[in-house]
Image (tube, grey):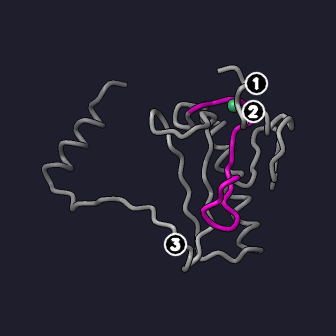
Amino acid sequence: MDTDDCRFCRIVRGDQSAHVLYDDAETTAFLDANPATEGHTLVVPNGHVEDLLLAEPATTAAVVETAQAVATAMNRTLDPDGFSVFHTTGGLVGEVEHAHLHLLPRFADDDVHLALDREELTAADAERVVDRVCDGPG
Ligand SMILES: [Zn+2]
């Protein structure tokens, strides 16, 4: 992807405005333009990467370190009850393909629902998944 067409690359370069909370040589953290909670932040690598799970480990580590630093500052200032942190990859990514870690300060009354339709893990399913992942290619 041409980074000129990438909204987050433009934010990193300063060509598009954003409410930046933190930046350094590797990462930028800015407020999500459509926050789910007060302080909802996106942490991005400064280089255009589409998937933190496939990025250089140092890049992913830098993003996580920045999320920790911002969360620490938020704990001192916004007084959240906790955080939710997530990253989506592949075909389920939304409109911006530049990898971004969502850092959501959580509050007891925030009305955020990260719903997972869960079932109890059976021994057979556990064994099958462990076998597939641990014996798979790579
Ligand atoms: Zn980008």
Name the residue type under label 2. Cys
Q: Residues within 10 Å of mark 3 (few under 14, many from 20)?
A: few
| Label of residue 9 in the image | 2
Ligand 1 shown in quarter: top right
Cβ–Cβ under 8 Å for marks 1 and 2? yes
Q: CA distance from mark 1 to mark 2?
A: 7 Å
Query: 30 or 54, which lies in front?
Result: 30
Q: Is residue 1 above or below residue 124?
A: above
- Say which residue label 3 marks: 111
Q: Earlier in the sequence, mark 3 or mark 2?
A: 2
Q: Quadrant of residue 68?
A: bottom right
Question: Residue at left 68%, top 56%?
Answer: 41
Q: Is mark 2 within 8 Å of ligand 1?
A: yes
Q: Is mark 3 within 8 Å of ligand 1?
A: no
Residue under pointer 1: 4
Residues in magenta? Answer: 33-50
The quadrant holding residue 34 is: bottom right
- Graded by Cα atoms within 10 Å as few (under 14), some (14 to 19) or many (20 or more), the crowding at tag 1 reads few
Q: Give the label, 1 or 2, closer to the camera.
A: 1
